[in-house]
Image (spheres, rainbow, N blue to C red):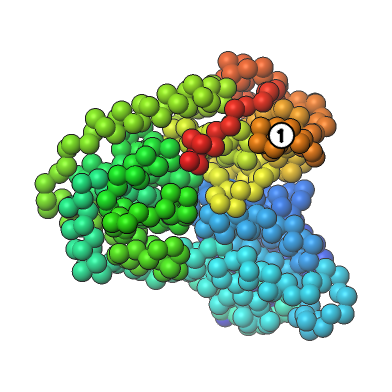
């Protein structure tokens, strides 16, 4: 036991759980947490940003790119609300983010007295954006709450949050030393369910596998399973890289839609399986096996024939071992190769302007680089056509589709992975959502590469207005700064690149610099990618 303030107990828990970087903006309700953080700077790096959404997105990038907890701190009320989009994105992609959210004094919560930063019911809002949350009413509650928060993250229950009232951070008590959280052992699949699923897959003439981020950690077993069954593996957004994109069985959604039409058995592992279910429809006679740690997934859409509520990597190992007892399939390779070649040719011809930039990215960047794809044309096409060798190398906002998330998220990814290039692909519409964090990148020496594709519009929406709605163009035009001078005004290095070849040269230049960089790329209207990306 040690005499500690609530603030000191929070810091003690961060240290016990191996947190080395904290993304934070101070404020009056957090004074006694930051008093405690002052003495922790010998082991903890505190990255203070220029906006609360910045610290939350940085924690998201840290978490998405590593699988380790990304932790941010913000004041209550408007500070918390400013982080809501990033927290909702963490929820969508199930990123292990811990939000430490200030609160007004515990005695004033719920009174409605007009306290500084008071919200009508902040706790309810926090609960709605997380998969677990708690609030400390006394300093004695902090050690257990923090331990539970980290244990939830280790178990894949994410994001999580702990609310910290100002008076609780100030109050002192005799408190136990913090302990590193220990997650419960991963849930193994029921043997009978594995046997049934393996039998279905072994009998299938045209099996098809879908993977999402729940399959992270099961890459080797997935490879064995897919190759033995000669089953194409469809990955969408978060699932990219679970099977390397260059593998002969790795396919995207355009190929997946075609293969869906003939699939007799579908295995969906650690994925919401939403786009295929909703847009393509489950055919009569199609037999579906779903593997997920979250049983709620099984009730969405038509119930699967076999539902395995278990750890996906463990289940993939069990399925691979079971199917390998039978003969391997070898009759689909030519057809799959021909389909992949056909779709690749469609990308190359119909999306030639975007693909020129995607190819430049892949040619210049090393395999281990991280790409953060915002909601912009090159970002969209990268999610389907950029070759990804492993999970966590292509970061997206998932189904949340959070415009403007990429630059600040890239700063978190880069601070967590300082030895590899991290590139944010932004449009001029989204970049200025967090472009102010160039100041943070310069202040903390975060060597992320920002790319801004500039067409003077919310380009995707404008193209739809022009092509789908009879030219009813409204509210999509933008007035931009000179992005090179904008970046340089913060102290970053920047240059303009006209065309894909100049863009490739600019990427090489950016990777050689010792600090943050920005590349401005003027572009014109791009062809629509959606019938290939989301058929």
Q: Does residue 193 appear anywhere in the picture?
A: yes
User: Is residue 41 or residue 272 the one in the foreground?
Assistant: 272
SS at badge 1: loop
> Can you say which quadrant of the picture contains the N terminus?
bottom right
Q: Position of residue 330 (x, y in %)?
A: 17, 37
Number of labelled discs? 1
Residue sitting farthest toward the right: 114
| Position of residue 463 in the picture relative to residue 257 (left or right) | right
Q: Position of residue 293 (x, y in %)?
A: 40, 65
Up the image or down, 411 lies above or below 335; here it is below
Q: Label 1 neighbourhood size at 10 Å, few (<14), some (14-19), many (20+)?
A: few
Residue tagged by mark 1? Answer: 470
Up the image or down, 322 lies above or below 149; here it is above
Q: Position of residue 405 (x, y in %)?
A: 65, 46
Q: Residue at x 37, y 66 (%)?
A: 303
Up the image or down, 66 lies above or below 366; here it is below
Residue sitting farthest toward the front: 470
| Position of residue 149 in the picture relative to residue 402 (left or right) | left
Q: Quadrant of residue 19?
A: bottom right
Q: Residue at x 66, y 65 (%)?
A: 100
Q: Residue at x 47, y 23 (%)?
A: 348
Q: Residue at x 76, y 29 (%)?
A: 456
């Amino acid at each position: 036991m040690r005499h500690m303030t609530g603030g000191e107990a929070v810091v003690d828990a961060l240290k016990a759980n191996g947190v080395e970087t904290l993304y934070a903006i101070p404020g009056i309700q957090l004074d006694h947490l930051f008093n405690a953080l002052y003495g922790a700077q010998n082991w903890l790096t505190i990255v203070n940003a220029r906006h609360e959404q910045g610290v939350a997105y940085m924690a998201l990038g840290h978490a998405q790119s590593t699988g380790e907890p990304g932790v941010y701190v913000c004041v209550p009320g408007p500070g918390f609300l400013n982080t809501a989009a990033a927290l909702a994105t963490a929820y969508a992609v199930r990123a292990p983010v811990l939000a430490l959210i200030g609160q007004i004094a515990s005695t004033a919560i719920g009174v409605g007295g007009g306290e500084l930063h008071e919200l009508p019911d902040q706790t309810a809002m926090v609960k709605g954006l997380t998969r677990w949350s708690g609030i400390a009413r006394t300093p004695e509650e902090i050690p257990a709450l923090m331990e539970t928060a980290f244990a939830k993250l280790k178990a894949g229950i994410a994001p999580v949050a702990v609310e910290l009232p100002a008076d609780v951070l100030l109050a002192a008590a005799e408190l136990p030393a913090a302990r590193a959280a220990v997650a419960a052992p991963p849930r193994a699949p029921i043997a009978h369910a594995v046997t049934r699923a393996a039998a279905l897959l072994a009998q299938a003439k045209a099996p098809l596998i879908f993977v999402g981020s729940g399959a992270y950690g099961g890459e080797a077993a997935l490879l064995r399973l897919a190759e033995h069954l000669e089953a194409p593996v469809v990955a969408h957004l978060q699932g990219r890289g679970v099977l390397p994109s260059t593998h002969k069985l790795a396919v995207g959604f355009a190929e997946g839609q075609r293969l869906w039409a003939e699939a007799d058995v579908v295995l969906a592992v650690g994925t919401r399986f939403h786009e295929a279910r909703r847009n393509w429809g489950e055919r009569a006679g199609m037999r579906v096996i779903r593997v997920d740690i979250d049983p709620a997934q099984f009730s969405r859409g038509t119930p699967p024939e076999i539902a395995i509520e278990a750890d996906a990597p463990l289940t993939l190992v069990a399925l691979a071992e079971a199917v390998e007892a039978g003969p391997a399939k070898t009759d689909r390779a030519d057809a799959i190769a021909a389909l992949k070649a056909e779709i690749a040719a469609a990308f190359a011809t119909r999306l030639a302007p975007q693909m020129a930039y995607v190819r430049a990215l892949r040619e210049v960047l090393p395999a281990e680089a991280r790409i953060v794809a915002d909601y912009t044309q090159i970002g969209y096409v990268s999610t389907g056509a950029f070759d990804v060798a492993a999970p966590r190398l292509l970061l997206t906002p998932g189904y949340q589709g959070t415009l403007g998330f990429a630059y600040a998220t890239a700063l978190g990814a880069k601070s967590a992975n300082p030895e590899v290039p991290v590139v944010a692909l932004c449009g001029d519409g989204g970049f200025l959502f967090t472009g102010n964090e160039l100041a943070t990148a310069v202040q903390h020496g975060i060597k992320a590469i920002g790319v801004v594709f500039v067409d003077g519009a919310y380009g995707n929406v404008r193209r739809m207005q022009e092509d789908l709605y009879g030219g009813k163009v409204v509210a999509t035009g933008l007035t931009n700064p000179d992005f090179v001078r904008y970046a340089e005004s913060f102290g970053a290095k920047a240059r303009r690149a006209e065309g894909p070849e100049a863009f490739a040269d600019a990427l090489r230049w950016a990777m050689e610099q010792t600090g943050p960089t920005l590349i401005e790329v003027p572009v014109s209207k791009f062809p629509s990618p959606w019938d290939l990306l989301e058929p």
